[in-house]
Amino acid sequence: MKEIPITNFKNLKIGSTENTKAGTGCTVFIFEKGAAVGLDVRGGGPASVESELLKPMAAAEKIHAILLSGGSAFGLEASCGVREYLEERGIGFDVGVTKVPLVCQSCLFDLAVGEVGTRPDKAMGYEACKNAETGNYKDGSYGAGTGATVGKVKGMDFCMKSGIGSYAVKTGELMVGAVVAVNALGDIFDWKTGKKAAGLLGEDRKTFLDSEEEMLKINQVIENKFVGNTTIGAVFTNAEFNKTKLCKIAGMAHDGYARSIRPVHTSADGDSIYAVSLGDVKADQDMVGTLAARVVSQAILRAVEHAESAYGFPSAKEIKKALDEKQA
């Protein structure tokens, strides 16, 4: 098994755009030939478009794009730009008079990071598609990960900067990869070592607290929890599956969230994973699902490792540097 670039998949174009000042952005995945897609949502507060298309009983067998964005529910407007871009190029479901692009979208909450009045809109969605023509995807504080943060059990005052990350592998002919925008309520861990990589900070904003332990100290019912969270991502494979099996693979990929984020799948998160089939390689569904969980975990780790400090939130790089200097 070897690592490969996330851009190695056929029938996949990835583009990102962001408003760095406002602290928001979006990342689009375009499937010009269409692709079978499944979805599994585990969080309690999702914001999404066209999720019903991905249920096994829905008629649509393929969709044409997935958009991940910031902006919470306001950011859902950005998918209009993706549809416009695809229709102009004759990509979509043929209805005779035109072709209707089938575009799914999931949003994360970044309204409390930069400028609350600036959100991903139609123009930003269109621009992300234009950028996909040449491919400008990068791990870190870009696209849907521009305003992402983690470790928010005690609110925004003690959280850290996060971002978007990717990881892909090839074994034989089979390829499996993931892109994840990490905006979790909980802490982020290295799934291999168990070491904390980012999350809730103490009063000094230099050392870690344990989000689960802090949550357990709150011995009361909280009716209106801080919902500025949600980790959203997509798993890609060149194996051939229908959307029923892809929904199961997406569900197995959530194990990657569980290994890397604690706590995870809370009522204050909208955790969602898409699973996309981009080829005709024959592979076992459970094997691909198991591998999907691994690449998701590694993509989550990449997201926090490549993030840069911004908007007053320290990154994992900054915290590590401070710790190294203290120990020197």
Image (cartoon, rainbow, N blue to C red):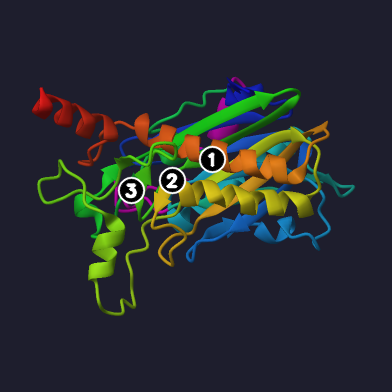
Residue 122 drawn in magenta:
yes
- Secondary structure under the numbered disc 3 in the rendered image: strand
Q: Nearer the viewer, residue 286 or 56?
A: 286
Residue drawn at (26%, 54%) of the image = 210
Residue 207 seen: yes
Determine crowd level at label 2: few under 14, some 14-19, many 20+ residues with C-alpha closer than 10 A: many
The image position of residue 197, as x and y in percent, is 32, 38
Residue 50 drawn in magenta:
no
The image position of residue 137, as x and y in percent, is 51, 26
Q: Is residue 88 above or below residue 202?
A: above
Residue ID for mark 3: 150
Mark 1 or mark 3, which has the lower sequence index? 3
- The answer to the question of whether label 2 and label 1 lie on touching residues, with beta carbons closer than 8 A, is yes
Name the quarter where the C terminus is drawn: top left
Mark 2 or mark 1, which has the lower sequence index? 2
Residue ID for mark 2: 260
